[in-house]
Image (cartoon, rainbow, N blue to C red):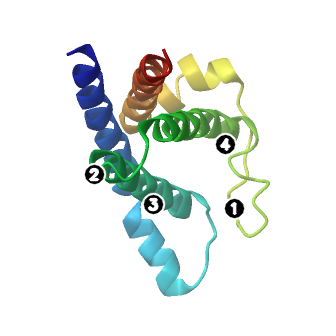
């Protein structure tokens, strides 16, 4: 019973996380389609958002169909959630992608971890980013519990 609840919660959270990334108004599928149409990739986020969202949905489908062992899927999901969370902070802490070689105008000033976490901008000002980080963190925890249960 507990496993079933955790699995259902994991699926719901994973669909939310995938949806937030796939349909993000600035970095989701529409931005990627724009970049494809101009044959340029000035910002890596749309490609990363769309590919990772598709990977999440594919993972859910493969596990549900029994085509993929859940343990590696849980580990992969946990790794992706860590990449999302760390990537958000890294993007803002290291100049808003100023390191991205093909980007123009992406650079900017860097922020401290605390500025991003509790400062006036970023998570406090961006409900979508805050919702995404909460969903990702929750999914990370639920996948960790499922992995521990599978291993135990």
Gap in angstroms between the C-alphas marked 1 and 4: 14 Å
Whether residue 52 sits left or right of residue 95 in the image: it is left
Gap in angstroms between the C-alphas marked 3 and 1: 22 Å
Expressed as whole percent of the image width and height from the top left, the position of residue 48 reads 55, 57
What numbered label is drawn on residue 91?
4
Residue displayed at 75% across by 59% down? 100
Q: Which residue is mark 2?
A: 65
Gap in angstroms between the C-alphas marked 1 and 2: 44 Å
Label whose residue precedes the other's in the sequence (2 or 3): 3
Vertical comparison of 106 with 147: above or below: below
In this rendering, which labeled residue sits more in front, label 3 or label 4?
Answer: 3
Q: Which residue is mark 1?
A: 105
Label whose residue precedes the other's in the sequence (4 or 2): 2
The N terminus sits in image quarter: top left
Residue displayed at 51% across by 61% down? 46
Q: Secondary structure at mark 3?
A: helix
Expressed as whole percent of the image width and height from the top left, the position of residue 117 reads 57, 21
Label whose residue precedes the other's in the sequence (3 or 4): 3
Label whose residue precedes the other's in the sequence (3 or 1): 3
Q: Taking the image as drawn, is residue 137 in sight?
A: yes
Q: Quadrant of residue 106?
A: bottom right
Whether residue 46 sits left or right of residue 112 in the image: it is left
Vertical comparison of 151 with 73: above or below: above
């Amino acid at each position: 019973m507990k496993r079933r609840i955790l699995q259902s919660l994991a699926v719901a959270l994973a669909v939310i996380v995938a949806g937030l990334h796939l349909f993000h108004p600035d970095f989701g599928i529409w931005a990627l389609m724009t970049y494809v149409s101009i044959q340029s990739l000035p910002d890596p986020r749309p490609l990363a958002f769309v590919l990772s969202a598709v990977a999440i949905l594919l993972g859910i489908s493969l596990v549900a169909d029994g085509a993929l062992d859940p343990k590696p899927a849980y580990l992969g999901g946990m790794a992706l959630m860590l990449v999302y969370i760390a990537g958000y902070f890294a993007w803002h802490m290291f100049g808003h992608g100023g390191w991205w070689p093909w980007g123009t105008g992406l650079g900017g000033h860097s922020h401290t971890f605390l500025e991003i976490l509790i400062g006036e901008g970023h998570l406090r000002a961006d409900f979508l980013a805050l919702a995404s980080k909460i969903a990702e963190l929750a999914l990370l925890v639920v996948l960790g519990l499922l992995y521990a249960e599978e291993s135990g």
